[in-house]
Amino acid sequence: GSNGRDIIASCITPSLSKLILDCKLLQRIEYKSKNPHRTRDYFCALKNVNRHAAFVFYLESLLSTAASGEPPRLIRVSKDLLAGFDQMSKSIKVAGTLFSHLIRHDFFLPFSLSVFACLSRLHEVLEQIKKGLRALCALRKKNEVHTENPQGSINYTAEVPQKASKKTRSPERNMQNPVSTLPTQLQSVLPHIANPKAEPLERPEGDSDDEGEPVGDAETAALLAAL
């Protein structure tokens, strides 16, 4: 908090009054010169600069709240304000280039010299304020790192899901093979039922060769009936 107030008091507040004065002066020049220059490219560039001046007046409102004891709000939006002022600096450079062409060819000298002088001073003061905003952005980043990790160590205490027990991991593994629960004789018959073209079943021990009849459907039916 105190560091933020020091940056605001040393870098932003002294330059803001000059910046507001130049912005209001450019807006007045635009209003007075609108009729003869409204369609010219240099005048459109001047209007673009005045549109970006909205960031200046927004900064003024934020400083008024910071003076009442709320500088953290300005610190939070410092990154957005810095991006807006960067756009404003680009528009100032474009407008300054166009008005320098007017001065070089001696066109509308009172008008073009007045605008060019305001743009040059606006650019200089704006750089000072951007320097203060960059310091506020660095302070904001430092505070965020300190808030997330106050002791400078990384927290690895995230819960790791435990592995499921063998009983609950996969129910299919706990199920016994249904074929293994059948009688031994029926286990030998099941492949023959599923594939009738399979090789003939061997005769059980104790059967005589005189019958001359291979083990087949009759024995299968008897085993199935026994179930």
Image (spheres, grey):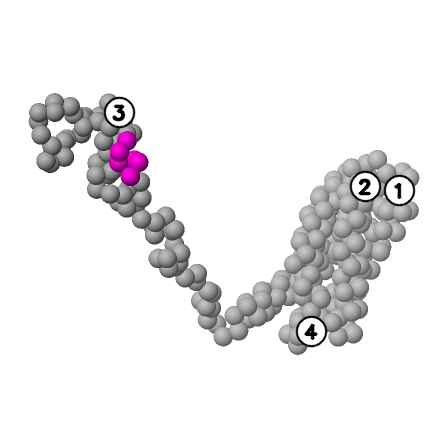
Q: Where's residue 199, x and y in %?
A: 18, 26
Q: Residues within 10 Å of mark 1 (few under 14, many from 20)?
A: few
**What's the CA distance linking mark 3 and mark 1?**
101 Å
> Left or right: where does residue 89 sit relative to residue 54?
left
Q: Amino acid at mark 4?
A: Arg
Considering the numbered disc 4 on the image, is that residue within a helix, a strand or a loop? Answer: helix
**What's the CA distance linking mark 3 and mark 4?**
93 Å
Disc 3 + disc 1, Cβ < 8 Å: no
Q: Which is nearer the N-term, disc 3 or disc 1?
A: 1
Q: Which is nearer the N-term, disc 3 or disc 4?
A: 4
Work out whether 193 lies above or below 180. above
Q: Where's residue 134, x and y in %?
A: 62, 62
Q: Which residue is mark 2?
A: 43
Disc 3 + disc 4, Cβ < 8 Å: no
Q: Main secondary structure of the magenta part?
A: helix
Work out whether 146 lies above or below 187. below
Q: Which residue is mark 1?
A: 34
Considering the numbered disc 1 on the image, is that residue within a helix, a strand or a loop? Answer: helix
Q: Which residue is mark 3?
A: 196
Q: Which one is in front, 5 or 199?
A: 199
> Left or right: where does residue 134 sit relative to residue 201?
right
Disc 1 + disc 2, Cβ < 8 Å: yes
Q: Amino acid at mark 2?
A: Phe
Q: Which residue is mark 4?
A: 5
**What's the CA distance linking mark 2 and mark 3?**
97 Å
Q: Residue at image x 76%, y 67%?
A: 63
Disc 4 + disc 2, Cβ < 8 Å: no
Q: Amino acid at mark 3?
A: Pro
What is the magenta range? 221-226
Q: Which is nearer the N-term, disc 2 or disc 3?
A: 2
Disc 1 + disc 4, Cβ < 8 Å: no
Q: Quadrant of the C terminus?
A: top left
